[in-house]
Amino acid sequence: MALMGATGERRRTAHALASRRANTSLRLIAAFAIALILDVFIDLHGVWLWAAIYAALQFVEPWVSTWIRQQSERAQTVWRRLSSTALPFVTSAVFGFISLPLFASQARFAPTLGGMLLAGALLNVVVINSSQRSAIISAATPYVLYLLIVPLVARAANPGSPLANALWFGALLLIATVTIAAYTLHTALKAAAKAKDEAERRRHEAEEAVAAKSAFVAMISHELRTPISAILAGAARLHGEAQDTSAKVQAQLIADAGGLMRSLLNDLLDFSRLEAGRMSVEKAPFNLRQTIADTVRLWRPEATRKGLRLRVKGAAALPRWVAGDAMRLRQVLNNLLSNALKFTTRGEITVSPRAQVEGSMVLLSIEVADTGPGIPEDSLSRLFTPFEQLSDAIARHHGGSGLGLVISRELARLMGGDLSASSPPSGGAQFTLSAKLEIAEAPADASAAAPIADLRVLVVDDHLVNRRALELVLEPLGVRATLAESAEQALEMLQSEVFDVVLMDVYMPGMDGRAATRILRASTGPNQNAPVIAVTASATSEDWEACVAAGMNDRVSKPIDPFQLYAALARTPPVSSADSMDTRSAAERTLG
């Protein structure tokens, strides 16, 4: 507490000195103007000497400040405090001295000019030194003394004038007025500082609350992804092995329920990231036409099942290769198509993409229109409200978190565009997604994806359910999976056996996946250069950058999507025959 008080005192002292230095030019100009006026109109003797002394004091202050900075830290505190009181006192004493000959002058209005000079100087002291009470007292004291002296000077100069005695009243009234003004200003500044501190405290509390909520959501999502992964993997395995129709229907029901849980979890996690300002978009080349076509193709079976027509208009006019975040673009488009299919019972859904090329930029616009019941005019404003459904009946019938459109709009804005909704007079609903992309060159033709059958994969995860879920997903793909329950156990296996790929859980108790990957890359074992795929529930760019820095090659998200996992395994860099022979020979020598 004492340290905070001392820090505040130093800050106020430094602020007062800085304020005085900032007004040096103004004080010099004022002194020169006063000297010139008194010399021309009153012919006051010695006024230029007064001005010279006052100007010299203005250059003493910077010199003293420089000298203080050269002292020790302890000495600086003492001298700075002394200079913040002594220098203003001396400067005010010199400046106010000119009022004495003005009150003693027989020139008309000279005493009035002297009073105005002292009043203006007092007010200037209050304003300039408002942050430090000691500086106000030291700078104002000479002016107060002059105001108490000038009635005596005026009475001596005008012994027969009764108005000389009235100057006592005027001086005391001026002192009282300035004192009240100083107190009022000090109180106002103190209240403003207190309000600012309170606002800052509340801001910190709000940031901490958001951070705590985000951490809680991240922790819960990580824990929920484990059983969801198992549900999806088990359902897929049951569906593939079931012989009768009834068993397949039941397996599909489990898979659909697991998929719904995953969607709700992803929405909550995305919304939490958006609230905390931690959501970001990537920029990488992708095939825009193919991305839109693949996304629409995903929903065609659902449209066919409902007897709806799902068509795309104008995709052929789009540029083929662009740079942007294909995953986020698909996420928004998936949400719009999901909503359109959810609320449309007959007719068609039309996806109309358009692109305007301006130099290297592509202004993309995708309109998704349906022939459903449309959106009431008074409900349009509530579409993008978090956790809001247009009606209780919709919430009961269709479910959902009420976050899809909110997240989609924020993602569109992160991509430099927006998401808007309308309900045309002809009926139906119309959503328009816009985004800014960049023209990109087609990447060099890669060789066909390597087959993943017979790959030897080491699965590293501290949770038994996650290991079993990954094993269930990998087995139908023909992959030979070996399981490790900790990073330490995995490193032991990697020193004695040869693996084609390592699926590494990022967050594990004890040694985490990134630390294990760094140790693997620094080793000289047979798997030093083996591809490592991060398995993580986090999708932030910061986490992925940390994974890349640790030496990881790719990533898949929890809950595990078999297609995503297959694609990641297919992307693993192939090992040449020579390298494979060398690593296997090294492993055999290690084993003895």
Image (tube, rainbow, N blue to C red):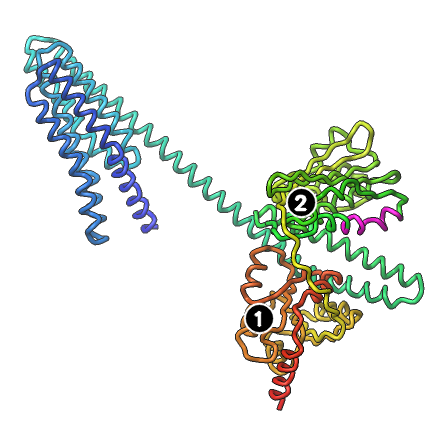
The main secondary structure of the magenta stretch is helix
Quick check: 205 left or right of 507?
left
The amino acid type of the residue labelled 1 equals: Thr
Query: Are there few (<14), some (14-19), or many (20+) residues within 10 Å of tag 1?
Result: many
Judge by depth and name the residue closer to the eye, 365 or 469. 365
> Which secondary structure, mark 2?
helix
Quadrant of the rendered image containing residue 462: bottom right
- Position of residue 13 relative to residue 55, above or below, is below
Identify the image quadrant of the C terminus: bottom right
Query: Residue 407 placed where, x, y %?
Result: 67, 44
- Position of residue 584 relative to residue 60, above or below, is below
> Which secondary structure, mark 1?
helix
Quadrant of the rendered image containing residue 229: bottom right
Which residue is denoted by mark 2 in the rendering? 407
The amino acid type of the residue labelled 2 equals: Ile
Query: Residue 188 placed where, x, y %?
Result: 37, 30
- Position of residue 169 relative to residue 424, above or below, is above
Q: Which residues make up the magenta segment? A: 294-304
Q: How many marks?
A: 2
Marks 1 and 2 sit apart, C-alpha to C-alpha, by 34 Å
Q: Earlier in the sequence, mark 1 or mark 2?
A: 2
Which residue is denoted by mark 1 in the rendering? 517
Judge by depth and name the residue closer to the eye, 227 or 520. 520
Query: Residue 109 placed where, x, y %?
Result: 15, 11
Query: Nearer the observer, disc 1 or disc 2?
Result: 1
Residue 228 visible? The answer is no
Residue 389 visible? The answer is yes
